[in-house]
Image (cartoon, rainbow, N blue to C red):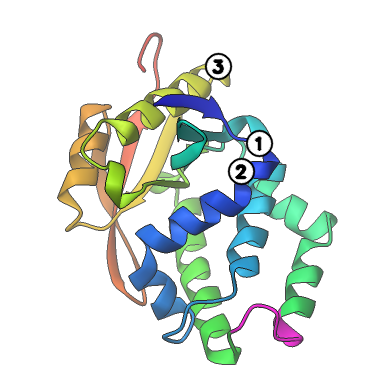
Amino acid sequence: MRIEQATAADIPAIAAIFTECFKESVLHHCGGRLPNPQAMIDVFSLVYDAEPAAAFVAREGDAIVGYCFAPARLSGLWRRAVLSGALFRWAWRWVTGRYGFGLHPLKVIVLNKLAFLRSAVAPAKAADARILSIAVTKACRGRGVASALMDAALTYFCSCRARRVRLEVRPDNAPAIRVYEKHGFVPGGFTYDSQGPWLIMFKEMGAGNV
């Protein structure tokens, strides 16, 4: 198993891992049915294009078994979504049925994102870098893959001179919380979406603090 920077060609595999690992959440947001793969591919393509150096994958042979998106300049993501025309493309694909979900799921997604944005701009909960998404295929869990991806992300944050890193995790996800605590993250409050609470965790980045 090796950790590498992701390429644009890896996005479909990353989107598939996200759907596998967070299936319950995807079903909740999309009205009880899985969306067409293009929906997740479009989201991860935007995140990747905004900061390619922040995307990492774990490979085993030719297969991708895990990924991590760790942007150090998250504000650029939303700016790119507007300036690149991604929001308009998403709207068109949604209206023409290419994503496979209707109006109610879109409302749930928007309201949840607004809740996260309100939390992210609160002074006590703000950060200049994020572990935006990390996942490992079920078959490869318990082998240190997530920990290795976190190591790569934190090394990247150091190179970007990030000062504070934030992530969110469900409070009942004990294995993930153990990984984050191992890497120096500490609890810093909660935020909420339509599925319940998220534990917010922070890591203060100092000299040699990886």
Residue lying farthest to the front in this orientation: 61
Question: Could you tell me which secondary element the residue under label 2 belongs to?
Answer: helix
- Image coords of residue 49 (percent x, y): 72, 44
Magenta-colored stretch includes residue 3: no
Amino acid under disc 2: Asp
Q: Is residue 166 above or below residue 29?
A: above
Amino acid under disc 1: Thr
Question: Could you tell me which secondary element the residue under label 1 belongs to?
Answer: loop
Q: CA distance from mark 2 to mark 1?
A: 5 Å
Question: Could you tell me which secondary element the residue under label 3 belongs to?
Answer: helix
- Image coords of residue 97 (percent x, y): 70, 86
Q: Which residue is mark 3?
A: 159
Label 3 CA crowd tier, 10 Å (few <14, some 14–19, many 20+): few
Amino acid under disc 3: Ser
Residue 127 at least partly seen: no
- Image coords of residue 187 (percent x, y): 23, 43
Q: Which residue is mark 2?
A: 10
Q: Mark 2 or mark 3: which comes first in sequence?
A: 2
Residue drawn at the location 24% of the way across and 45% of the way down: 176
Q: CA distance from mark 3 to mark 1?
A: 20 Å
* CB within 8 Å, label 2 to label 1: yes
Query: Residue 24 occupies which quadrant of the picture?
Result: bottom left
Residue drawn at the location 45% of the way across and 63% of the way down: 19
Q: CA distance from mark 2 to mark 3?
A: 23 Å
Assign the magenta stretch its main secondary structure. Answer: loop
Q: What's drawn in magenta, residue-wise?
A: 94-100
Q: Which numbered disc, 2 or 3, marks the residue closer to the eye?
A: 2
Residue lying farthest to the bottom in this orientation: 103
Magenta-colored stretch includes residue 99: yes
The circle on residue 7 is 1
* CB within 8 Å, label 2 to label 3: no
